[in-house]
Image (tube, helix red, strand yellow):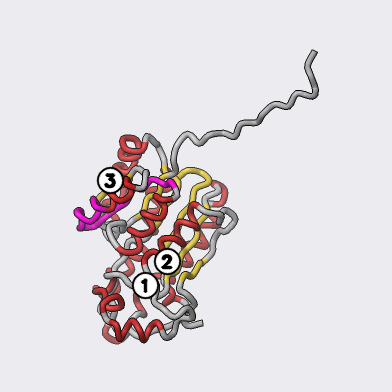
Amino acid sequence: MPNDNVQTEIVPAVPTHRPVALITGTSRGIGRSMALHLAERGVSILGTYRSREDEARAVVRLIEERGARAAMLQLDTSETGTFGAFAGQVATTLEETFERSNFDFLVNNAGLGIYASFAETTEDQFDQLVAVHFKGPFFLTQQLLPLIVDGGSILNVSTGLTRFASPRYSAYAAAKGAIEILTRYLAQELAPRRIRVNVIAPGAVETDFGGGALRDNPTLNAQVAAHIALGRVGLPDDIGAAAAAILAGGFGWINGERIEVSGGQRL
């Protein structure tokens, strides 16, 4: 007869695979930091680079040193006509490198900085900014949707400049504002697949973005830091750590939100 007093041990299910994040613009700056922080949390990385293959390969080595798998693919996020072929490359790389048919996290991070006053912004500059910061993420995400797992997550990258205004950033900030609106719509439309969609908005950060002026000009750095509650300009690791927490931490019930990471800039 069965013994009703015998307790059966419940063994938690062991994940069959490590999560994989696809991050655009992974060879430098914030994208590089995101990749390394996610790798430290056990997430493997499929990154992209536009032209700096040597730097991308160096990031692969750093990720592997942290015990995660990594691969890099070339991608110009302004060339939407290449996205179909790129999605095919992603599918092949997932199978060959990660032994997966899909991935868990998409980070639309790749960007470029073109800054000019509203009166002096050219149509070519405007088109470049919209192509990289809005049109590219829109159609790249569309192409990659079949490869994102149900219950996965998308993280778009915006800027603190959508909340406060600063001269010479009107076109750049407007393109980022568009990605913030898109984030909310995606969160609604992808909800049946339980795919969370959020947007992270970095404040001023010391990188080589925009020629590295904020990083390399102490006077400018101090001027900007004076308007940040925590008293300093951000570092790439400030943003990378936050992105890793949003994707692979305890943010599972946050969806459709703009999360600013600025140290309290212009409160």
Distance of label 1 from label 2 (alpha carbons): 9 Å
Type of the residue with mark 2: Asp
Residue drawn 52% across the image and 54% down it: 249
Residue linked to disc 3: 85
Quarter that holds the N terminus: top right
* Residue 52, percent from left and from top: 20, 57
Distance of label 3 from label 1 (alpha carbons): 33 Å
Q: Is residue 230 left or right of residue 13?
A: left
Task: Name the quadrant containing residue 44.
Answer: top left
Residue linked to disc 1: 205
* Residue 97, percent from left and from top: 32, 38
Task: Note whether 120 is above or below 87 in the view shown.
Answer: below
* Mark 3 Cα-neighbour bin, 10 Å: few <14, some 14–19, many ≥20: few
Mark 1 lies on a secondary structure that is loop
Distance of label 3 from label 2 (alpha carbons): 34 Å
Mark 3 and mark 2 residues within 8 Å of each other at the beta carbon: no
Task: Based on the picture, tell me whether residue 13 belongs to the magenta stretch.
Answer: no
Foreground: 41 or 168?
A: 41
Q: Which mark is residue 238?
A: 2
Type of the residue with mark 1: Val
Type of the residue with mark 3: Ala
Mark 3 lies on a secondary structure that is helix
Mark 2 lies on a secondary structure that is helix
Residue drawn 51% across the image and 60% down it: 185
Task: Name the quadrant containing residue 76.
Answer: bottom left
* Residue 100, percent from left and from top: 39, 36
Q: Which residues are magenta?
A: 42-58
Mark 1 and mark 2 residues within 8 Å of each other at the beta carbon: yes
